[in-house]
Image (cartoon, rainbow, N blue to C red):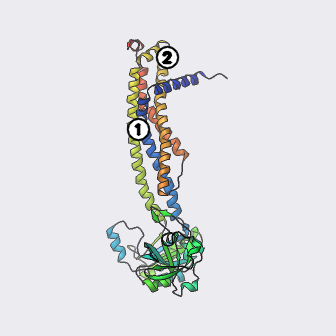
Amino acid sequence: MPVPLGLAALWESFRVAVASLRANKLRTALTLVGIVVGVTAVIAVVTIIKGLDKTVATTFSSQGSTVFTVSKRPRVITSREDFIKFNKRKDVTLDDAEAIFRLCTTCWRAGIAANSLEIVKHGDKKSENVAVRGITPVAMFDIDAVTIDAGRVWSESEGSSTRELCVVGADIGENLFGGDAPDKLIGKQVHVAGRPYEIIGVLQRLGKIFGQSRDNIVYIPYSTYQKNFGARDSLVVFVKTASAGDLEETEDQVRGIMRARRGKLFDTNDEGFTLETQDVFIDLYKKATENIYFVTYGVAAISLIVGGIVVMNIMLVSVTERTKEIGIRKAVGARQTDIRVQFLIEAITVTAIGGAIGVLTGFGLAYLLALAMGFPLLISAWSAVMGVGVSSIVGVIFGLWPAWRAARLDPIEALRKE
């Protein structure tokens, strides 16, 4: 089957373009640098952020869309004025929690948690800044979306008896017991803030988020927490609904209960408590990464523009060097369109090659960063196509002027050029 004349001409132009690039390797390499840097930046950051998006969404949505909290102050405070205002609120107390448990008709599961940071010891080993979490009832393990790896959780009767029992995160076994298997920790003791606790369960590893381990934690019954640590701070009440469709109605019920207890049924300035879901962290994260996207795209755009200018200058030099060749081609019948297409293909070829290299180096850089930070690597075919496509468009835009100049050369003047 014969090849169409137009395709044959394009293929010949491509072959001439590749031959020209191979003949000037150093020039070609310098031309590629700006394109490669721009595409690498975009591909690496987009790939890393997609992996980070998945990690953050999985972490903060682990409780699902059916859990919300009632607390004294928001978990994210952005100003000193807000911090002072929220600290003036009344603490969320056990009485508040019991009122929610008693009056909320659509609450499927509910519990409370109190938290502090303590030193945990075993023998001559210690671990600082361990999150100690006093919870009740046992359903809080399910609300917190943690799973037992070895042993068990305490029973409701054990939880109300103020016994020194605990369920520990994986880091406790690693840091204090030399990495013993989880089942070997059952029955052993750790000292939390100087008091001995018997380990009855070990949690499955959760990993890190933003460099912070989620496994450096000790769960104890809330009654035990009250006895040993007192009422140090306001409680956090957790409420879980049976389905996502019940969430809004349940939030309205709990909000009404708490506003009535605070005497703020008609106060629109400050309800006296904060009701929020895990979406607050996801929204904060999205706002932060939006800025990273804009900065990265800005850097990439500047790199691509600089790379495009380099391409244009190199192509202009190429036109000057090949003036006589252009004259000969015109003398034997080449049209302006043929000359223009040849130089455009040359510009597109070099930028497309730069884009392909940038895609590979971008994915490579993203792989190394993901490996170092512990994020999953999500390679997107769309981002690869975008990298090569955008770089090719840069070739078209910045190759037009040199191609136009080459096509407009007078063949007689071009043949006289030495």
Residue 234: % across, % down:
42, 79
Asked whether residue 31 is in view, the answer is yes
Q: Residue furthest right?
A: 1
Q: Are marks 2 and 1 in contact (CB under 8 Å)?
A: no
Q: Is residue 392 visible?
A: no
Residues 194 and 223: in front is 194
How busy is the neighbourhood of tag 2: few (under 14 within 10 Å), some, or many (20 plus)? some
Q: Residue at x 49, y 26 (%)?
A: 17
Could you tell me which quadrant the N terminus lies in? top right
Q: Earlier in the sequence, mark 2 or mark 1?
A: 1
Image spot of residue 281 (x, y percent): 46, 64
Question: Percent x, y for residue 85?
Answer: 34, 73
Q: In the rendered image of this protein, does residue 209 appear above or below residue 363?
A: below
* Mark identifier at residue 235: none
Please identify the quarter of the rendering in which residue 211 is found: bottom left
9 or 277, nearer to the observer: 9
Image quadrant containing the C terminus: top left
The residue that appears at 39% across and 49% down in the rendered structure is: 295
The residue where tag 2 is placed is 334
Q: How many discs mark residues in the rendered view?
A: 2
Give amino acid for label 2: Ala
Secondary structure beneath label 2: loop
Q: Secondary structure at mark 1?
A: helix
| Residue type (three-letter) at the residue carrying disc 1 | Gly
The residue beneath circle 1 is: 34
Nearer the observer, 233 or 410: 233
What separation in Å lies between label 2 and label 1 (alpha carbons)?
A: 33 Å
Which circle, 2 or 1, is nearer the viewer? 1
| Neighbour tally class for label 1: few under 14, some 14-19, many 20 plus, Cα within 10 Å | many
Q: Quadrant of residue 74?
A: bottom left
Residue 183 coordinates in the image, percent (x, y): 59, 73
Along the viewing direction, whichever of 42 and 372 lies nearer the viewer? 372
